[in-house]
Image: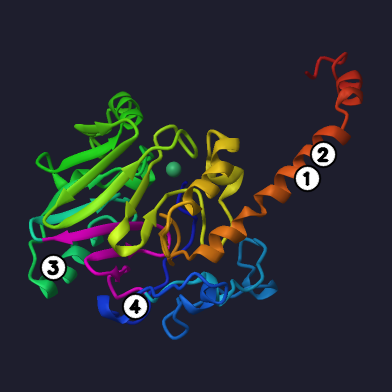
Amino acid sequence: MPRPAGPVRRAGRSTPSEWAATPTGSPSSVVAAVPVAGVLGAPAGGADAADAAGLPGFEPVPPASMGPALNADGYHVGRIEGNLYWVTDAYYQAMFLSTRHGVVLVDAPPTIGTNVLRAIEDVTRANGRPGKVTHLVHSHAHADHIGASVLFGDDVVRIGHRANREPLLRADDPNRPAPKVTFDSRYTHSVGGEQLELAHHGPNHTPDNIYVHAPAYRTLMLVDVVFPGWVPFKNLAISQDIPAWIKAHDVALSYPWTTLVAGHLGRLGVRAGAELQKYMADLEAGVRAAVKSVDPTPYFQEYGPGGNA
Ligand SMILES: [Zn+2]
């Protein structure tokens, strides 16, 4: 997904301990998981928001869609649980595990860029653990999620699904080298007393998009499927296999997580939000009805003979 236009709003500085997700999985926790005091300033909506270019405004964004305030450097880093952390710039998200032997990072979005390094330093300076990123897990190959991979040099061990390697080799993008470690269906990454379980359950958003599960911390990272507090970007987040992308909601919910790191926007997800996004079933029913009821024949008959295929 491309980054939406517009300024990143910055608010007061916050520390990792100030904002920890404590989702409970109950419907009310959709709101409860979002700190009221620390939300980003909601952009002005309605007609007042129309700018000099005459662009339309919009209704106010619900407070529950907003995440914690960003610090003066434009990011927020927070503890999910135990040694698992997340970092966001309100558009993108990465997740990292602080272990006795270094940091395991999942994704390196270029919009967050070097702030990922600052976020890791914030955490490891406080907990006394090594701050070097030893492993970088790719959720999938899209540049907007791993395009800052280059920051971690040649020594970092890049890990991705088997289908992650080929598109990255083909792209030959120096900012996102191909993974050296790949797997087919499951891969358990254990380091320094910590564990991440990576799994591929078939294509969804992309052929290589994986599920990153931290069972000890009841957290799942799945990118470009669920959009906590929001709706998917256009064309269902530009996903390649729509039926499988819809099915991915059920696959995600089959994991026993209480916190979802969804890769986008400024807040974490809870189960109620993932259930809510299953309104995709209504969307699918509506599309199926439209496909049946809209007859394109008259348009072809009217315009085809004139040469406008
Ligand atoms: Zn993507």
Query: Which residue is depicted at the point 78% across and 18% down?
Result: 309
Q: Helix, strand, or loop for circle 1?
A: helix
| Front one among 104 and 40 | 104
Q: Residue at x 61, y 66 (%)?
A: 52
Q: Is residue 185 above or below residue 20?
A: above
**Residue underneath mark 1:** 286
The range drawn in magenta is 70-99
Q: Amino acid at mark 3?
A: Thr
Q: Are marks 4 and 2 in contact (CB under 8 Å)?
A: no
1 and 4 marks in contact (CB < 8 Å): no
Badge 4 marks a residue whose secondary structure is loop
Q: CA distance from mark 3 to mark 1?
A: 49 Å
Q: Classify mark 4: residues with Cα within 10 Å, few (<14), some (14-19) or many (20+).
A: many
Task: Check disc 1 and give the amino acid type.
Answer: Gly
Q: Could you tell whether 168 is left or right of 251 in the image?
A: left
Any part of residue 82 in sight: yes
Q: Main secondary structure of the magenta part?
A: strand
Q: Is mark 1 within 8 Å of ligand 1?
A: no
Q: State yes or no: discs 1 and 2 in contact (Cβ < 8 Å).
A: yes
How far is mark 2 from mark 3, CA to CA? 54 Å
> Dots 3 and 1: beta carbons under 8 Å?
no
Total numbered circles: 4
First in sequence: mark 3 vs mark 1:
3
Which residue carries the number 2 mark? 290
Instruction: Identify residue for label 3.
Output: 124
Indicate the colouring scheme. rainbow
Q: Is residue 284 above or below residue 39?
A: above
- Estimate the x, y position of residue 209 in percent, counting from the top left: 41, 39
